[in-house]
Image (spheres, grey):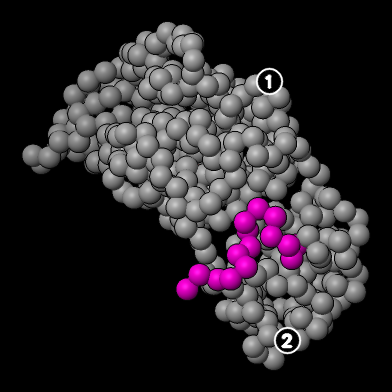
Amino acid sequence: MEFEEGDRVRVSKSGVEYEGIVMPSTTGHIVIKMNSGYNAGITPQGATVTLLQKKEDIASSGKEAAKPEITARTGLPKVSILSTGGTIASKIDYRTGAVTSQFSADDILQAIPELTEIANFSGRAIYNILSENMKASYWQELSKAVVEEIHKGADGIIIAHGTDTMMYSAAALSFMIDTPVPIVFVGSQRSADRPSSDNAMNAICAAKVAVSDIAEVSVVMHNDSSDDICAIHRATRVRKMHTSRRDAFRSVNSEPIGYVDYATGEICTSLPYIRRNERILTLKSSLVPKCALVKFTPGASPDILGWFIDAGYKGIVIEGTGLGHVSTDWIPQIERATSHRIPVMITSQCLNGRVCDRVYDTGRDILKAGAIEGEDMLPEVGLVKMMWALGQTDDYGTALDMLKQDIRCEINKRSLE
Ligand code: ASP
C-alpha cells in the first residue's frame, strides 16, 4: 500500500487496529498520530496498511469546514482577540510531527463559531510563537496593542497565548496596564486537532469573562478534568502546575477570582475584584528586563549570585528554601548586590505560604544584608514586578518601596492557612 507522511491510514497488526495520521519516522517503524493525540510505532513486518484519506484531502476538507461566514450582530459587546501563538493557535504539522502555531486570531474565530454569539470580535495576530519564546520586549508590544484596542472601543480583550509562560505575560500586563475592561489570557493544553482539546471551552469561557464586569487581567482555563467549569485566575496569583493536564493552572496563595459554568455561561465570583470602568486606562510599560530569578539549591556556589552582579543585572529575585533562606555563604554576595543598589528579593520554593526571614539566623542575616521579603508572592511574579518597578523609577529606595507594596493583589497582607 502506497502512503506518505500526512495521510490518514489504518494499520492492522496481530488483530489490533491503529488509525491515525502518518508521522515522520527515522527508525523504520510506521509511526502514526492517533486520534487520542498519542503516537504509535508499529514494525512494518506483518502489518496491513489501509489508506483512508490522502493528506491533500485532509487539508482541503479542513479548510472548507473552517470558513463559516461571520457577521456582526447588533447589541453585542466588542471584544478584541489578540493572538500570540501557543497551542490554542496550533495544530500538528504533519511534515514534522510537531505542534506548531499556525492559526491567526481570525482562524480561532472561524474554528469556534459559538464565540460569535457572545460578542462581536475583531482579531489581530500580534505574534505567532510558542510562549517559551516570549520576552519582556514582547510584553511591552502586547501591552501597547491591548491599550490601542481599548482606545478603539473594545469592551474586553482576549489574549490567546501559549500556556508555558502565560503567567509571566499576564503578570506583566497586570502591572503595566490600569485597565477599565477585562483583559483575559487564554490558552490550551491540547491542540484543536485532538479530540480532547480544551481550546474551544477555554476560549468560550474567556469570552464570557471578557464581556463581564471583571476589569482585571486574568487567566481563564479548565478548572478540572471534565468539560464543565473554567477558573478565572488573577494574573498575579496563577501558575501552570502540570505539564499536560487540562486543569494545569492553579491559583496559589489565593482563591481564583471566580468560575465560569461552561454550559450556562454563568460567572460566579469568590473574591472581590475591580469592576468595569473603575479605573482610567493608563499604560506604564517601561521595564528593566535585565533582572534575574535565581534558584538556591543546597551547596550551590555563591559565585552564581556573584556572576549576576558582575554581569550588570539590575535586580535579583532569589527563590530560597522554606521560609526564604539561602546558605550562609551566599549572604556576602547579597550584601554586595544591595551595596551596589541592586534590589534583592527573597521568595520561596515552597510557593504556598509566606516568606519570613525573622525566624532563623540565616533569614535575619539575609535581611541585615539588605534583601527584602517577597511576602507570599510567586517567584516569577516577583521577577516581573522587579522588572516593572525598576522601569518606573531610578531611585533605589522608591523601587524597594514599590516592591514591598501590594500593587495588583500579588501580596496578601495576611496569609491563608
Ligand atoms: N509550549 C507551548 C507554549 O507555551 C505550550 C502551550 O501553548 O500550551 O506556547
> From this viewpoint, is residue 190 visible?
no
Local SS, label 1:
loop
In which quarter of the view is residue 154 placed?
top right
Which residue is depicted at the point 71% across and 24% down? 151
Q: Amino acid at mark 1?
A: Lys
- Residue count near mark 2 (Cα–Cα under 10 Å), binned few <14, some 14–19, many ≥20: some
Label whose residue precedes the other's in the sequence (1 or 2): 1
> Quick one: 294 or 262, which is closer to the camera?
262
Residue tagged 1 = 152
- Highlighted range, magenta: 403-417
Local SS, label 2:
helix
Q: Is residue 322 above or below residue 274?
A: below
60 left or right of 36 in image? right
In which quarter of the view is residue 330 placed?
bottom right
Question: x and y percent of residue 318 in the render?
Answer: 69, 69
Residue tagged 2 = 364
Which residue is depicted at the point 59% across and 36% down? 276
Question: x and y percent of residue 341 in the render?
Answer: 89, 67
